[in-house]
Image (tube, rainbow, N blue to C red):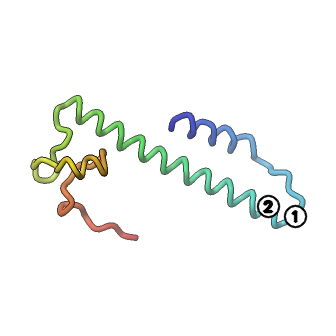
Amino acid sequence: MQARIQTRTEELEGTGDPDVSDRGDEAQSIAEREQAIDDNSTDRELLGRIDRALSRINMGTYGVSDVSGKPIPIERLEALPTATTLIDEESPRNE
């Protein structure tokens, strides 16, 4: 994942002034750059969650809810290894 972020970053740095022949090409280039930036952000967020899960393993707190201190069911951890709460403890997302 880090290699993927690095590759995208290098590609973004190398495309400062895209060589475009019309507005459609320019719009496509901008959309691709924005998507690459969004993808890097998503990957960085996931890496952060993975790093926190690894830290919790090292501290002996992996699989224990941050909210209640109760064990997180193995089925939840298998589905979402970076989970830090029980399902009913999650705050609603604003989407």
| The quarter of the displayed image where residue 87 is located | bottom left
Mark 1 crowdedness (10 Å alpha carbons): few <14, some 14-19, many ≥20? few
Q: Is 72 located above or below residue 14 in the figure?
A: below
Percent position of residue 3, x then y:
56, 34
Q: In this view, does 95 lie to the left or right of 4?
A: left
Pinpoint residue 66: horizontal percent, then vertical percent.
17, 48
Marks 2 and 1, how far apart in space? Answer: 6 Å
**Helix, strand, or loop for circle 2?**
helix
Q: Which amino acid does label 2 sit on?
A: Glu
Does 88 sit left or right of 7 as displayed? left
**x and y, in percent, of residue 51 in the image:** 35, 36
* In the image, residue 4 above or below residue 45: above
The residue tagged 2 is: 26
- Residue at x-position 28% and y-position 68%: 92
Q: Which residue is drawn at 55% across and 51% down?
A: 39
Disc 1: which residue: 22
**Residue 70 as seen in the image, left or right of residue 25:** left
